[in-house]
Amino acid sequence: MKNLIKEFTKGIIKENPTFVLVLGLCPTLAVSVSVANGIGMGIAATFVLLGSSIIVSLIRDFIPGKIRIPCYIVIIATFVTIAELCMKAYSPELNRSLGIYVPLIVVNCMVLGRAEAFACKNNLSRSFFDGLGMGVGFTLALILISAIREFLGSGQILGHTLIKGFEPVFIFGMPSGALLVIGLLLGFFNLLKNRKI
Amino acid sequence: MKNNLIVSGSPHIHKQESVPRIMWTVVLSIIPAGVAGVIIFGLDALWVTLVAILAAVLAEAVFEIWTKKKVTVMDGSAVITGILLAYNLPSNVPLWLPIIGAVFSIAIGKQVFGGLGQNIFNPALVGRVFLMASWPKYMTTFVKPLSYDAITSATPLAALKEGKILEHISYLDLFLGNRGGCLGEVCILALLIGAAILLYKGYISWHIPATYILTTAVFVYIFGAKQLFHGDWLFHILSGGLILGAFFMATDYVATPLTVKGQVIFGVGCGLLTGIIRIWGGYPEGVSYAILMMNAATPFIDRYTKNRIYGSR
């Protein structure tokens, strides 16, 4: 059990997909304009990660090594389609603001990376907690980045104005602002990592 | 006897020059343009400049104490960054704007790369572009020259971009700085005085400024009007931040190529980009973006224009 908790928690800080593994940057850069987008994207990616990790670890002994990547892609794409259709049905507004980046979860290197690096070598329970931890880590990272960007870029968090008279820093609403924020956060996490050792 | 036989590594010939000496001379040489800016736009220009300098120096000191490095605020490089940033701002900006810009210049433009000598971009321009992207409202309202109150006016280049005809501005007005613009870029005469000091002292070489200005002039002469070869090249040289950029910002030691050949490529590249942005781009002025883009290209230019080592093939 302790082992499983470790698989779960490593995804949040020690092997955080965004800040330590630096995977899945494309959706991170693109959708982190607002916290709502970040949460939506995080939940969708967590669902896909979880589903694909479970299936891949269940059928890992049947997949021939040479065609494993196409197999993973098919599995991942299935879950992405489920996530996308659900999102379209229950929250069309979110789907519209995330746009192309929902179907693009298929090629998110984080999802494929976990299937290739973890789920295909580990049993069901470990893969489940790995996927869950990675998903939660990704979601938290997205929320952190998008909170910084939304606050600085528009003076709001989740649509609520925090400080009256705050002059929004437009650059943080633009792609260059996303790169700046992610770069600084990466540096900050590296600093924390180096301090500990 | 033994003491006279110390053999040290090269260089063996020493000059008086040092980083602080060069930097403070640059500061001195750029002061006339600021004085002109204060005369043209009033005391606001002075406050903006002083606040920017103070913020840049403080940011540098705080950052260096925080990262436990040697505090190098006395070498004058932070002062130059502050001055250059302020010279790239309109004189009527709220005073928090130069503060944020200077802190950003020093922190993101310079110290994250490791301080003086390591920055890949000109720090002052990094700050300016950050402010331009963040608060375009403040960065593009300019005070009318010599009016001393809050009448705003467009810069000549912006007016040109909107298709207005500029009959009331003569070349002499442009040369002396009687026009709307950023506070340090308007008075070409004062800038040229400073540039002359630097050139005389040998602190900057003529290659980058000359090729930069020449390329821009030729480019706008060819493409600057509806007909080919009818562009108003003198107007383009005298307006905008071309002179300030060419002599004081494109000649940054750190972020420009080392060899003469490389510097010529750098200058021509800056000139082409400036012309392209001015004529076909979305912004009226392109000097800062042109210099930053060529800063980014500098490592490549350096790589391909390396001098042949004597004796090698």
Image: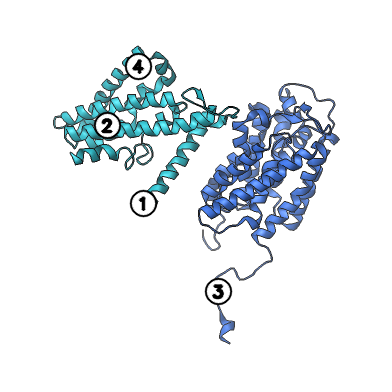
Q: Kindly identify which residue carries mark 3.
A: B8
Judge from the rendering whether residue B21 lies leftward or rightward of residue A72; answer left or right: right
Circle 1 SS class: helix
Q: Which residue is mark 4?
A: A87
In this rendering, do the residues under marks 1 and 2 share a single chain?
Answer: yes
Amino acid tagged 2: Leu
- The chain that appears blue in the image is B
Count neighbours of disc 2 (C-alpha within 10 A) and say few if under 14, some if 14 to 19, many if 20 or more. Answer: many
Q: CA distance from mark 1 to mark 4?
A: 41 Å
Sooner in the amino-acid sequence: mark 1 or mark 4: 4
Residue position marked by numbered label 2 in the rendering: A132
Outermost residue toward the top in this view: A89
In the rendered view, tell whether residue B15 sits above or below residue B274.
Answer: below
Query: In whole angstroms, how far apart are the C-alphas of marks 2 and 4?
Result: 20 Å
Q: Secondary structure at mark 2?
A: helix
Q: Residue at x 36, y 36 (%)?
A: A23
State the cyan chain: A
Q: Position of residue B283 (x, y in %)?
A: 65, 28
Q: Residue furthest left?
A: A61
Callouts 2 and 4 on one subunit: yes
**Which of these two is toward me, B229 or A155?**
A155
Q: Is A55 displayed left or right of B77 in the figure?
A: left
Q: Quadrant of the N terminus of chain B?
A: bottom right
Q: Are marks 1 and 4 on the same chain?
A: yes
Residue type, label 1: Lys
Residue in the image at 67% along x and 42% along y: B85
Q: Give the mark nearer the N terminus: 2 vs 4.
A: 4
Left/right placement of residue A104 relative to residue A175 reads: left
